[in-house]
Amino acid sequence: QLLDNIYVINNSQWVVNERVNLKDFLTSTPGGVKRVKGDGPVGDAVSPVVATPILDKILPAIDYWDKTKEIRSGVRPGSDMDPDVLKETTKGAFLEHLNRASQKIEMITRMLAESGVKEAVLQCHGILVRHQDQPRTVQLRGKWVPVNPQEWKERTDLSVKVGLGTGNEEEKRQKLMLLAQLQFQLLQAATQAPPQVYAKMYALFEDMAKAMAFELPEKYALAPNGPEYMQMKQAQAQQPNPEMQKIQAQEATKQHAAQMQAQVDQNRQEWESRQQAAKMQMDMALERLKADMQMQLEREKVAMRAEVDTLIARIKAEAQIDAAQLTAQTTLSAQQEQASDDAVGDK
């Protein structure tokens, strides 16, 4: 490859002059012959280009820019996560170091916001006012609301608010616990305090929430001019006096107790009536059962008496027949004996 009288052969650069055979140098053959012209030394015809090392010059430049970024941002890569350093560092010292780094980052972020983001937002605002001729629905503070850029006024300046989060996880938990305590106190004030007092307490809660980097205080409490707070107050206004409620509750309890006692008495009377009716029905059933059993017994007695009489009559008849047969046999025997005696006497 010919580049301004410099040839690259087998990934090496060579400087040649008019004595060399260009065809040999244009053919890249490993171990190939490179012919030169004349009787002079070969080293006068070709010589390798020596690469000057520049690593010792690049590394100081990289180190310089790393230190510059560290000084400007306050954050050293990997220093906060070194276990050998953290095991000898107290919690307060670590948090103080982290806060200092965060303050430098916040300063840089605010500078970028003021110098770049602010101008970009102003330009976007102007473009929307000039070209957006229809209302749009956007999400603002967690709610979808309609906006019409045609109704906006032209702005030449605006305030930049940089949201940098709420710190580390432990700091977030502490802030949320404090916010929960304030929320509980504010909830009690919303139900008991007058609206004017509650409005001032909510203003303090709003400032404290924003100071803790919570940009939507109405997400955690009822705003004095919000519909939820108005509905709660209207519901409380429609409710009667607590003392009257207590008296009415006592009267209602007494009436309920009287109704329960009347219901118990009625149930007891109905139960007794049912028990008496059941007893009467049982007695009647027993009487009917006794009568049926008596009638059955009488029928059995009559049947048994008839059977006994029939048996006695049959026995008597059989006895009479047996007696008649015996009498007849006796008479016959006597007659036969008499006849035999007469016959013997005649002889």
Image: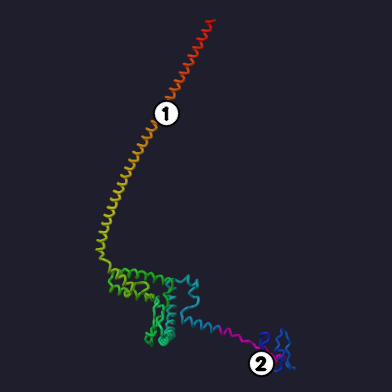
| Mark 2, secondary structure of its residue | loop
Q: Is residue 43 magenta?
A: yes
Residue shown at 51% from the left, 7% from the top: 342
Q: Look at label 2 and name its amino acid.
A: Asn
Where does the image place residue 30, in percent across and percent down from the top left? 71, 84
Residues in magenta?
A: 42-58
| Residue 204 seen anywhere in this rendered image of the structure | no
Residue 208 falls in image quadrant: bottom left
Q: Sort mark 2 into few (<14), some (14-19) or many (20+) by Cα contacts within 10 Å.
A: few
Q: Quadrant of residue 35?
A: bottom right
Q: Which residue is mark 1?
A: 307
Q: Nearer the viewer, residue 299 or 327?
A: 327
Name the residue located 48 percent from the left edge and 74 percent from the top edge. Answer: 80
Q: Nearer the viewer, mark 1 or mark 2?
A: 1
Return the x and y of residue 118 as percentages of the image width and height: 42, 85
Instruction: Specify the quadrant of the image occupied by residue 166.
Output: bottom left
Considering depth in this image, is 125 or 283 the residue closer to the camera? 283
Q: Is the N terminus in the top left, top right, bottom left or bottom right quadrant?
A: bottom right
Specify the label residue 5 is tagged with. 2
Judge whether 184 appears above or below 37 on screen: above
